[in-house]
Image (tube, rainbow, N blue to C red):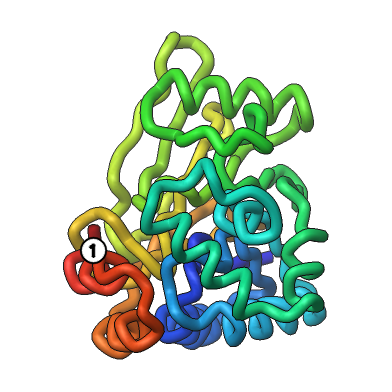
């Protein structure tokens, strides 16, 4: 089974549509959206509607911290994110809010565990930034599911592939090359941060997502150009913070 892994859409309809078109051309069998459907962008209604339909068609959909903020308490967010969450809450119908409210924090398929942030205390939305974070994530994942070989996450808005053998105290990471197929060796445990569809933060404005092949134990990361100028203009027209629009063109 080949699964398209998408995360951190952030109400960016143009980026979502571009990634879904790209994934369809790759011949994927299933989709998984790893949270943060909303926040920052100007199309929360259309994005939630599209992903709700995807869920009905068999996609896995998880809750992210921005989704949680929209349905609950936005105070933990920074100022621009908080303003965006409050605006988003007003745009969404009660049905859409209930859809977000019902989303789980984790899901598993075979030896793949999917989370928004980390398998370690997933409700606290820890960032996978350094080796200690990744080892804690892998340890928690294996406690939950001893056969897990890959944890897929979003949240950090950058693409990384971490590996950990258990024989060394630290996990190692590298930046994947877009389109390259990477074998997930059985002697290691792996953590993939798949980047952000709607708000990349690595200096490249192209949308990010990944495809994992469970049967072949392989993963590929992709970058997909999209009309970020159109998405930014919608943000400005909605009266959302200007930085939300500016960062789309610079990938920050």
190 or 229: which is nearer to us? 229
Residue density around tag 1, few if under 14, some if 14–19, many if 20 or more, within 10 Å: some
- Residue 143 in the image: state x and y as whole percent: 75, 22
- Say which element carries label 1: loop
Look at the image and tell me in which quarter the N terminus lies: bottom right
Quarter residue 201 falls in: bottom left
The residue located at (42%, 61%) in the rendering is 196
In the rendered view, tell whether residue 24 sits above or below residue 70: below
Q: Position of residue 176 (x, y in %)?
A: 31, 51
The residue tagged 1 is 251
Is residue 5 something one can see in this rendering?
no
Up/down of 172 relative to 153, above or below: above
Measured as percent of width and height from the top left, residue 198 is found at 41, 70
Foreground of the two, 63 or 59:
63
**Which residue corresponds to the image point at 48% horizontal and 79% vertical from the top-left?**
16
The residue at 74%/69% (across/down) is 97
Left of 2 or right of it: where is 103?
right
Nearest the viewer among 63 and 1 is 63
Question: Can I make out residue 100 in this image?
Answer: yes
Percent position (x, y) of residue 180? Answer: 34, 60
Count of numbered badges drawn on the protein:
1
Residue located 24% across and 86% down the image? 229
Quarter occupied by residue 91: bottom right
Foreground of the two, 87 or 13:
87
Q: Left of 26 or right of it: where is 67?
A: right
Q: Quadrant of the C terminus?
A: bottom left
Quarter residue 250 falls in? bottom left
């Amino acid at each position: 089974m080949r699964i398209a892994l998408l995360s951190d859409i952030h109400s960016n309809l143009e980026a979502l549509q571009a990634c879904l078109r790209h994934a369809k051309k790759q011949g994927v069998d299933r989709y998984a959206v790893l949270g943060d459907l909303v926040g920052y962008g100007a199309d929360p209604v259309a994005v939630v509607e599209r992903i709700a339909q995807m869920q009905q068609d068999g996609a896995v959909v998880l809750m992210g911290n921005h989704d949680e903020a929209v349905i609950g308490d936005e105070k933990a967010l920074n100022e621009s994110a908080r303003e965006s969450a409050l605006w988003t809450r007003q745009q969404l119908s009660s049905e859409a809010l209930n859809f977000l409210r019902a989303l789980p924090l984790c899901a598993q398929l075979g030896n793949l565990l999917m989370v928004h942030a980390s398998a370690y205390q997933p409700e606290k939305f820890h960032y996978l930034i350094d080796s200690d974070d990744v080892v804690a994530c892998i340890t928690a994942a294996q406690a939950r599911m001893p056969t897990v070989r890959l944890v897929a996450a979003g949240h950090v808005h950058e693409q990384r592939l971490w590996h950990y053998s258990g024989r060394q105290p630290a996990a190692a990471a590298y930046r994947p090359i877009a389109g390259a197929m990477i074998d997930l060796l059985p002697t290691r445990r792996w953590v993939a941060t798949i980047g952000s569809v709607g708000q990349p933060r690595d200096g490249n404005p192209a949308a990010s997502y990944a495809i994992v092949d469970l049967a072949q134990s392989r993963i590929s990361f992709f970058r997909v150009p999209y009309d970020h100028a159109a998405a930014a203009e919608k943000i400005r027209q909605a009266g959302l913070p200007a930085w939300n629009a500016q960062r789309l063109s610079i990938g920050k």
